Image (cartoon, helix red, strand yellow):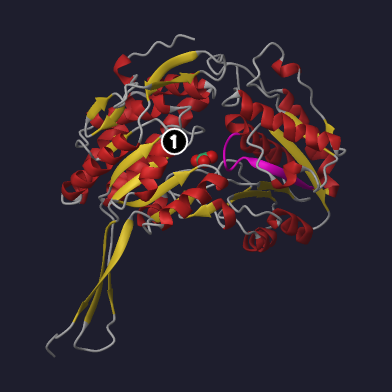
Amino acid sequence: MEISLSDSGLLKYQAYIGGQWIDADSGDTFDVTNPATSQVIGSVARCGAGETRRAIDIAEGAQQTWCQITAKERGDMLREWFQQIMAHVEDLAQILTLEQGKPLAEAKGEIIYGASYAEWFAEEAKRIYGDVIAPPSNDKRVVCIKQPVGVVACITPWNFPNAMLTRKIAPALAAGCTVVCKPAEATPLSAFAVTELARRAGIPDGVINVLTGVTEEIGQELTSNSKVRKLSFTGSTAVGKRLMADCAGTMKRTSMELGGNAPFIVFDDADIEAAVQGAVLSKYRNAGQTCVCANRFLVQDSVYDDFVAGFKAAVAGLKVGDGFDESVTVGPLIHEAAAQGVRDLVQDAVSKGAKLLTDDSSIEGLTNTFVAPSILVNMDRSMRVYTEEIFGPVAPIYRFTDEQEAIAMANDTNYGLACYFYTRDVGRIWRVSEGLDYGILGINEGILSNPSAPFGGVKESGQGREGSKYGLDDYLEIKYLCMGGIDQ
Ligand code: SIN
């Protein structure tokens, strides 16, 4: 697939360190492929520990001046970044679809969503407040000020290659931090493109550094280097645990946005049509590859048949294919191994008695990275999909009898990121909301994310929040000033 960009300067293949686009020291590169066709799009710099160390040193130097300029000036530059992104939505979306696979309309949605973090934190930069606290005795005064944590390492995933980067960089910069970012190997081009726009927005050299390459080497340097004071990671729980353990050696702050096993509960008093619409959005967004995608549908006995019939009809209307085809609503998975993993989960469920309500006709003639939007019924808890994150377009539907059972099933997981439920009963909304062990609840809503809301999970889904005023706090340290000898 050839893309036609109105601004070809956005296509970058080198790392960005200290305001320069550079090759890896070794000159090595690695290939980036289009998941819809498996064709190579280009080769990007394969950096390692040396370049990472250099980027950290530069970020540390830049932070000394970045934190001294006023919050308004930082906010103005973030606002300019937002405007630059919005002026290039079409190009950025093409780059995103090319390397990630999601349908072009969804890619545009991601770019606008990503830009909204730059806009939100441009505004929030000026709203960093401290506290004056009642002292323990009259000769003292107690004051708290907030200061940037320092250099932040950002490790971002391939499922939202634009928005997950802006969701970390924007609050970090607003707080007065500088960043060294490592985007996922599968999707570096979106990261480079949005970085180029930050450069054009006037964000000074060294404030944002982005490098791609040998994951272990870069990760090892980012987690062990004592100049990095915080790590913000979005990705799997398994990798998040390893990174947290590695950060312990230098006691870095961490924000971890990890895996999920989102329940989608449909109660007997729900608006079934709305629940079906929400279910399709929540499940099939990005071909099921989001941490907040519905992973287990829990439907009350008396409305089970109606919901399943409506959902099956809606899923039949989805069109799978190359994201550049405007009629396509579900793209490929990121690579063949991911698609095979999802097929294995379906096979496991079927071998234990599940029934597939869908077939593979929607993916006939497509490559092995495509998985048909699927619905599984006759489910039980022994099947792997009950406990594991699917990360693909497969919807297992379970039954429940009453509210207590629904809450117990929903909480029966080590994860705690997003949960959805549909009901029109106000009392039930409060009871269920309070009983669910999750960081984010969608109540009669299938899409949750926006910059004004705190995104994040509990249990093994991570810690910290992104977006909102709470997301800014994650990049700030509290310093307590105890002033004594106050004359009475
Ligand atoms: C994610 O899947 O990690 C993020 C999803 C979102 O921001 O909605």
Q: Residue at x 76, y 59 (%)?
A: 403
Q: Secondary structure at mark 1?
A: helix
Q: Is residue 278 above or below residue 139?
A: above
Name the residue that disc number 1 marks. 215
Quarter holding the C terminus is bottom left
Q: Is 215 situated left or right of 447 in this image?
A: left
Residue 454 appears in the figure? no
On whether residue 132 falls in the magenta region, the answer is: no
Number of numbered callouts drawn: 1
Q: Residue at x 65, y 36 (%)?
A: 283
On whether residue 298 falls in the magenta region, the answer is: yes
In the image shown, does 375 or 98 lie closer to the viewer?
98
Characterize the local packing of mark 1: few (<14), some (14-19) or many (20 or more) Cα atoms within 10 angstroms.
Answer: some
User: Which residue lies most toward the front here?
Assistant: 26
Q: Residue at x 73, y 32 (%)?
A: 344
Residue 237 appears in the figure? yes
The x, y position of residue 434, in whole percent, is 63, 63
Q: Is 358 situated left or right of 123 in this image?
A: right
Q: Is 476 situated left or right of 36 in this image?
A: left
